Image: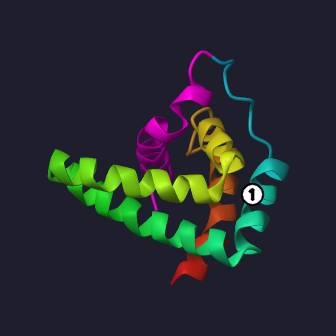
């Protein structure tokens, strides 16, 4: 999964559900490896969250395809589903996504963070 595209789509679709918590606040804190590992462990250790993560990954792929086709109707239809899944993953996951916005995906740090999520992606297969 392209980390930047995935994060962008997820953050944009999550804004309606979490918009009140995100607006007007301070800039997201810089992510640490420990932050990422904690979220990955939390998700992988909870069957409900793991299923939500896998479902979200599938929707992310659908959204990327719809975006390529400039299919705004499909994007709008998928949005509420992603909001629901984001809520199941919890506010820590949303904070993590906000923090990803500050990370260059091509940096060693960005690659390291993406690799941490590879283990989750593997569990979805």
Is residue 71 visible in the rendered image? The answer is no
- Does residue 72 appear to the left or right of 125 in the view shown? left
- Residue 78 x %, y %: 31, 56
- Residue 105 x %, y %: 56, 45
Please give the count of numbered marks on the rendered protein: 1
Task: Indicate whether residue 123 is drawn in magenta.
Answer: no
Helix, strand or loop status at disc 1: helix
Query: In the image, which residues are magenta?
Result: 1-24
Query: Depth check: 117 or 16 in front?
Result: 16
> Extreme right residue here?
34
Q: Residue at x 26, y 47 (%)?
A: 76
- Does residue 4 appear to the left or right of 72 in the view shown? right
Is residue 59 visible in the rendered image? The answer is yes
- Residue 109 x %, y %: 70, 46
- The kind of secondary structure the magenta stretch mainly shows is helix
Q: Is residue 55 above or below residue 79?
A: below
Q: Is residue 43 above or below residue 98?
A: below
Q: Residue at x 72, y 73 (%)?
A: 44
Disc 1 marks which residue?
Answer: 39
Task: Indicate whether residue 4 is drawn in magenta.
Answer: yes
Q: Residue at x 22, y 55 (%)?
A: 66
């Amino acid at each position: 999964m392209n980390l930047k595209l995935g994060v962008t789509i997820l953050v944009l679709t999550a804004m309606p559900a979490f918009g009140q918590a995100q607006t007007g606040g301070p800039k997201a804190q810089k992510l640490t490896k420990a932050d990422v590992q904690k979220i990955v462990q939390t998700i992988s250790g909870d069957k409900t969250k793991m299923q939500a993560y896998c479902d979200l990954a599938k929707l992310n792929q659908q959204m990327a395809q719809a975006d390529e086709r400039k299919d705004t109707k499909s994007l709008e239809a998928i949005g509420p589903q992603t909001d629901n899944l984001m809520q199941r993953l919890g506010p820590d996951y949303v904070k993590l996504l906000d923090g990803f916005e500050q990370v260059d995906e091509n940096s060693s740090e960005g690659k390291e963070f993406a690799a941490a999520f590879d283990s989750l992606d593997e569990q979805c297969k």
